[in-house]
């Protein structure tokens, strides 16, 4: 992938699927479809809540959180008082759950957030929280199946453990053949160019801390 694909500024590396509906890197489609069909045979309906996400989409999420238009959470899911946070605290609170625009793995088309559509009770609003994937959660059956079988299709969990950066996300899976090469290719200079050219909130603070953000929130992930 080139710099603009890695930072989500173009869509030349992705294609749209209609059944199931999602947007993936063209090289990930075959493996995802094979995993989806295998899960269906076990009564699990893999549904992609989020796959490719553009720089602009990630930017809108970031700016809304910076302005207090969307909630900021602690690592254990408690809502923070936006008005009481310093700019640096606000920066860290966003990064725990939302990637820096340009630094999101979702830009690559290799990463997907998964739920089991078959398991959702009528009227239930999916929250994408760890409890939903825990032993007694509504997606526990899917989680167990993916633990056993995802690697067969090339997928792994980059946020399995707490490495002091992004909070663990049991719903987030990466397609290794693409994601590993993308992570190796993405660097601080690319992120700096993308941030400098954007209308991101907190730009000066982000640029000041960009090397640390890159190490803590981009590089500090689990591998297959």
Image (spheres, rainbow, N blue to C red):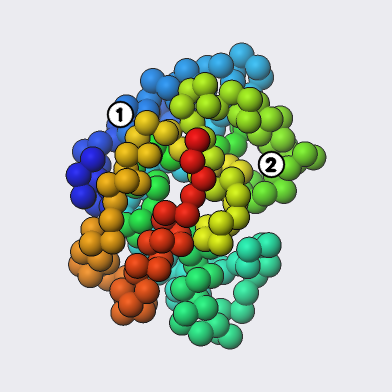
Question: What separation in Å lies between label 2 and label 1 (alpha carbons)?
Answer: 28 Å
Question: Which image quadrant for residue 150?
Answer: top right
Nearer the observer, 181 or 72? 181
Q: Position of residue 120 (x, y in %)?
A: 68, 36
Question: Can residue 81 be spotted in the picture?
Answer: yes
Q: Position of residue 14 (x, y in %)?
A: 29, 35
Q: Position of residue 204 (x, y in %)?
A: 31, 79
Q: Position of residue 198 (x, y in %)?
A: 25, 67
SS assignment at label 1: loop
Give the residue drawn at x 56%, y 79%.
82
Question: Can residue 118 be spotted in the picture?
Answer: no
Q: Quadrant of the N terminus?
A: top left
Residue 26 tag number: 1
Circle 2 sits on which residue? 133
Residue 189 tag number: none
Q: Establish if 135 lies above or below 118.
A: below
- Quick check: 129 left or right of 187? right
- Quick check: 221 left or right of 109? right
Give the residue drawn at x 65%, y 17%.
42
Question: Which image quadrant for residue 26?
Answer: top left
């Amino acid at each position: 992938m080139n710099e603009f694909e890695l930072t989500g500024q173009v869509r030349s590396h992705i294609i749209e699927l209609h059944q199931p509906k999602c947007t993936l890197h063209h090289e990930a489609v075959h493996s995802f479809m094979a995993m989806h069909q295998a899960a269906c045979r076990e009564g699990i309906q893999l549904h992609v809540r989020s796959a490719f996400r553009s720089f602009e989409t990630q930017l809108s999420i970031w700016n809304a959180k910076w302005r207090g238009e969307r909630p900021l959470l602690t690592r254990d899911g408690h809502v923070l008082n936006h008005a009481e946070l310093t700019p640096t605290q606000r920066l860290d609170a966003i990064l725990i759950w939302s990637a820096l625009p340009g630094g999101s793995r979702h830009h690559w088309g290799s990463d997907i957030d998964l739920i089991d559509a078959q398991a959702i009770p009528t009227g239930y609003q999916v929250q994408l929280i760890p409890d939903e994937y825990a032993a007694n959660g509504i997606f526990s059956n899917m989680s167990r199946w993916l633990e056993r079988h995802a690697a067969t299709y090339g997928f792994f969990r980059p946020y399995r453990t707490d490495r002091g950066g992004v909070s663990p996300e049991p719903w987030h899976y990466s397609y290794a053949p693409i994601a590993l090469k993308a992570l190796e290719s993405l660097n601080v200079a690319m992120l700096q160019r993308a941030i400098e050219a954007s209308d991101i909130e907190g730009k000066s603070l982000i640029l000041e801390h960009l090397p640390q953000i890159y190490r803590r929130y981009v590089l500090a992930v689990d591998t297959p």
